[in-house]
Image: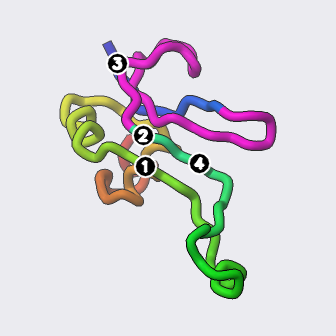
Amino acid sequence: MVVRIRLARFGNKHQPFYNIIVAQARSARNSKPLEVIGTYNPVPQRPTNLSDEEARSARPYKEVSLDRSRAKYWLGVGAQPSDGVWRLLSLAGLAEGSSKARN
């Protein structure tokens, strides 16, 4: 039984939104997961709580929310992250090295 941490796509056309899920490796992308451990919005968002001048000069960001304790648990029991999730986990400081070095 191989368990993967991967992205499940939601959202409309040209407006992707992903759930970071834990699922069986052989299950379909949007099938029911074992657990949802976070979300990822790849569309750059500008900060909303700034004045107009600050908002124009502020850098857009991509929103990632992740339950770090559950991600650590699933990595500890042997769940294999996909390449995209590996990049997000390395940004959060949970995965070391590059995705090519892990194989």
Q: Is residue 68 above or below residue 48?
A: above
Does residue 30 show up magenta in the picture?
A: yes
Q: Amino acid at mark 3?
A: Val
The 10 Å Cα crowd at callout 4, few under 14, some 14 to 19, many 20 or more, is: some
Residue 41 at x, y = what percent?
Answer: 59, 48
The label nearer to you, 2 versus 3, is 2
The 10 Å Cα crowd at callout 3, few under 14, some 14 to 19, many 20 or more, is: few
Say which residue appears at 29% left-offset and 40% top-offset: 71
The label nearer to you, 1 versus 3, is 1
Say which residue appears at 56% left-offset and 29% top-offset: 8
Quadrant of the rendered image containing residue 51? bottom right
Whole-Å distance between the Cαs marked 4 and 2? 10 Å
Callout 3: helix, strand or loop?
Answer: loop
Magenta segment:
11-37
Q: Say which mark, if any, is on residue 38.
A: 2
Residue 53 at x, y = what percent?
Answer: 70, 87
Residue that mark 4 sits on: 41
Residue that mark 3 sits on: 2
Give the mark, 2 or 3, whose residue is nearer the N terminus: 3
Residue that mark 1 sits on: 65
Horizontal arrangement in the rendering, residue 50 relative to residue 92 (left or right): right
Whole-Å distance between the Cαs marked 1 and 3? 25 Å
